Amino acid sequence: MLTFAEGTAFVTGGGSGIGQATAIMLAAAGVPVAVADIDGDGVTQTVTRIEAEGGAALGLALDVTDRAAVDAAFDKVEAWKGAVTILVNSAGILRVEPFEDFTTEDFETVMSVNVTGSFHCAQRAAAGMKAKGYGRIVNLSSVSGYRAGVGRTAYGTSKAAIAHLTRQIALELGRSGITANAIAPGTTMTKMTAAAYTEENKANFLKMIPSGFIAEPEDIAPSIIFLASEQARYVNGHTMPVDGGYLAS
Ligand code: NAD
């Protein structure tokens, strides 16, 4: 039985995919959830679903690359239902281009959302968590942060950086009752990957996945929920693959 400390969860990228599934599961477990995403329609969709199921949600249109906006969003959530005790950094983008053609602009855009955005939210969340002496930060890395993939120059680099950012937070904040961990999902069917995992190339991906199927967001979210729970207090600084065995093979 998992339990969650009193307080709210702040889920970035909560308007779609893994972030949305996580927000819905946390709310179903009784945690008030702030759903933050640059996509306002996605936010509305998640909040409507949570409220329809009897949960508490606060929708926030937020660009995680904007530090002032991140600070203002956390202020709003704290005024809503008190301290943020859980942060899930699921906002992310993917650009696929051959290494030799990768533009500086695209490289910096991916790094800015995936790495700097997670840094902004973690640093702001940590301030409140430190005051409370408790916190759970869960970042989203990827199997692409472990194994190079065609066209994933910026994406893979950003996800490897997330694994290290996670270690750094764990080291510096562990004694304040805060844990930081990351999940490294494998192939998961979401808005981000719909174009990549087509019926034609699906067979190629399936060959590389021992479990023999492509995940749904609901296959990834439970691992995030565990790391966000009180029971995960001795798991700190790690990145856990949730990949159907892809990295093990
Ligand atoms: P998704 O596209 O369904 O969700 C990502 C969300 O992030 C979207 O709702 C998008 O609007 C939001 N977002 C993008 N830029 C933002 C910004 N600047 N500020 C705030 N929100 C922003 O994709 P997903 O697959 O659910 O991805 C969630 C996380 O999981 C990402 O970090 C992704 O890299 C990671 N991941 C996904 C897979 C996969 O196969 N789907 C695999 C490994 C890791």
Image (cartoon, rainbow, N blue to C red):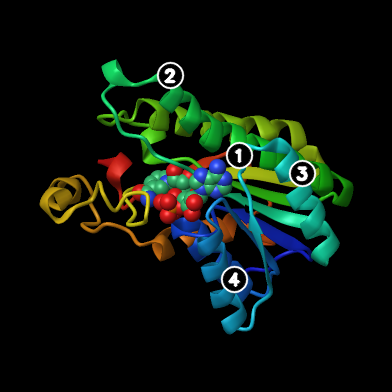
Give me the residue at 37% from left, 39% from top.
Answer: 143
Q: CA distance from mark 2 to mark 4?
A: 36 Å
Numbered disc 1: secondary structure: helix
Contact between labelled residues 4 and 2, with CB atoms less than 8 Å apart: no
Splitting the image into 4 quarters, where does residue 121 fall?
Answer: top right
Q: Is mark 3 within 8 Å of ligand 1?
A: no
Q: Of circles 2 and 1, which is in front?
A: 2
Give me the residue at 43% from left, 19% from top.
Answer: 104
Q: Residue furthest top?
A: 100
Q: Which residue is the site of mark 4?
A: 47
Numbered disc 2: secondary structure: helix
Q: Which residue is the site of mark 2?
A: 104
Q: What amino acid type is highlighted by mark number 1?
A: Ser
Q: Of circles 3 and 1, which is in front?
A: 3
Q: Of circles 1 and 4, which is in front?
A: 4
Numbered disc 3: secondary structure: helix
Asked whether, in this view, residue 22 is left or right of residue 64, the answer is left
Numbered disc 4: secondary structure: helix
Q: Which residue is the site of mark 3?
A: 71
Whichever of callouts 3 and 2 sits on the residue coming sooner in the sequence is 3
Q: What amino acid type is highlighted by mark number 4?
A: Val
Give me the residue at 57% from left, 61% from top.
Answer: 225
Residue 91: % across, % down? 53, 47
Q: CA distance from mark 1 to mark 4?
A: 22 Å
Whichever of callouts 3 and 1 sits on the residue coming sooner in the sequence is 3
Q: Which residue is the site of mark 1?
A: 118
